[in-house]
Amino acid sequence: MISLMLIACATKPKKDVQINLPNEPWWEAAVSSSDLTTRNLAQVRQGVLRVSGKSFMLGTTVDTEINAYAAMENDQTLIVMTTGFLGEFSSDQDVLASVMGHELAHHQLGHTKPGYLENRNAAVQAMSTTVGMISSFFIPFSGLITGNMVKAAGLSYSRDDEREADLLGMQWAMLAGYSPCGSYRFAQRLQALNKGATLAWFSTHPGLSERMENAQRISFKTSGSGCG
């Protein structure tokens, strides 16, 4: 178990989270585990490692929040899944592969490099402050429209990061033998759990409907059938 600060994929990072990080021999044995969650995670991890050519450590943390994280600690490439996420999706290897691929893609694309988020967010903050959005965000008709437009433009960088990670993650999942419909079912389930109520315009991620449409499109293109 180690204590570290995470770079969260979907939410603001949490501090001092306890992460369980099994070593390689443990994962190798887990491929044939009698426990379904353990076996599914180990098999998907094995496949993603094989097709991506990028090593990483996979860990879990006790948290009811449905989430997964990409993190760097002491130059180690980490992917962390919460018990809340595993409670919902551990029986679906397609979902595990899509999400694991997505988080690994953040590493591959440089999104977890030191300073990456800080530099991007600093640029957004500078633009927002220039038009007075921060000081007048909750005052009607006082810089609200202009400010929100700049805020949305800034957040689009993060949404673009997420779109890139979605695409690369699904490609790896498919190369490993899994369906892109895992991404579809993941977003669909979050919608059912009322996790997608926030307006997509102000989200740091693409909307759930957009993700489902993208997964549908890729599924039709690669297999001739959809995900619904």
Image (cartoon, rainbow, N blue to C red):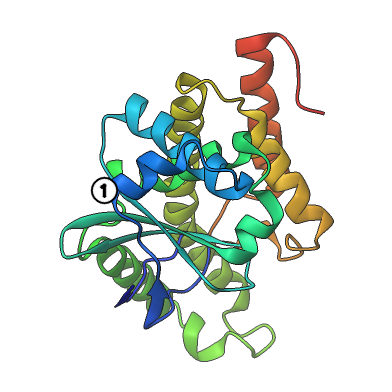
Categorize mark 1 by other alpha carbons within 10 Å: few (<14), some (14-19), many (20+): few
Q: How far across and how far down the image is residue 74, in percent?
A: 16, 65
User: Could you tell me which residue is drawn at 47 percent across and 44 percent down?
Assistant: 100
174 vs 13, nearest the viewer: 174
Would residue 146 be found to the left or right of residue 119 on screen? right
Element type at marker 1? Answer: loop
Q: Is residue 105 visible?
A: no
User: Could you tell me which residue is drawn at 53 percent across and 37 percent down?
Assistant: 97
Q: How far across and how far down the image is residue 79, in percent?
A: 39, 54
Q: Could you say which quadrant of the image residue 225 lies in? A: top right
Amino acid type of the residue that numbered disc 1 sits on in the rendered structure: Gly
Work out whether 84 lies above or below 167. Answer: below
Work out whether 187 lies above or below 31. Answer: below
Q: How far across and how far down the image is residue 34, in percent?
A: 59, 43
37 vs 188, nearest the viewer: 37
User: Could you tell me which residue is drawn at 38 percent across and 45 percent down?
Assistant: 27
Furthest residue toward left:
75
Furthest residue toward front:
34
Look at mark 1 in the image and give the residue it sits on. 110
Q: Could you say which quadrant of the image residue 30 lies in? A: top left
Would residue 65 be found to the left or right of residue 154 on screen? right
Q: Is residue 67 visible?
A: yes
